[in-house]
Amino acid sequence: MTTVPYQKPGVPEAHGLSVAECEATAWTVTPEGHHAGAAAINAVLAVALGTRLPLLLYATPGVERLQEGAYALVARNRRRLPGDIPYCRRYPDECSNDASPV
């Protein structure tokens, strides 16, 4: 698993995404395709934990809807949550002048 900051110029386009899509939700790109929101988080958890359990849980009837709702709530409020220093603020030389320091 490799994580890449979408704020770094060219990263979204290299993965078939737009900056707007990356600003809106988390993404996981796998050989099988692109996964957004809670599906992306479950894919990352499955790799990190070395088990398909998060994917199986997500596929359980009703769970996808609950997880996507919870993800949407967190996404709407992410700027209020404590977190890391934005990529472009931490590595300004790697971002273009017009890159958003999100």
Image (cartoon, rainbow, N blue to C red):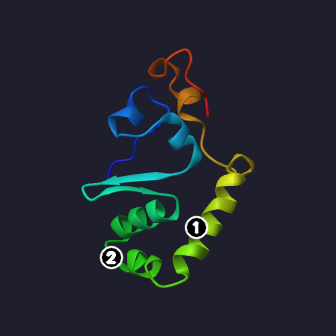
Q: Residues within 10 Å of mark 2 (few under 14, many from 20)?
A: few
Q: Residues within 10 Å of mark 1 (few under 14, many from 20)?
A: some
Question: Would you name the residue on which mark 2 appears?
Answer: 51
**Dividing the image into 4 quarters, which one contains the N terminus?**
bottom left
Mark nearer the N terminus (2 vs 1): 2
Label 2, label 1: how many angstroms apart (C-alpha)? 21 Å
**Label 2: element kind:** loop
Q: In the rendered structure, find residue 68 and report the number of the disc placed on it.
A: 1
**In the image: residue 14, left or right of residue 75:** left
Q: Residue at x 50, y 26 (%)?
A: 91
Occupied quadrant, residue 47:
bottom left
Q: Position of residue 51 (x, y in %)?
A: 33, 76
**In the image: residue 17, left or right of residue 102:** left
- Against 56, residue 89 (above or below) is above
Q: Residue at x 58, y 67 (%)?
A: 68
- Against 67, residue 34 (above or below) is above
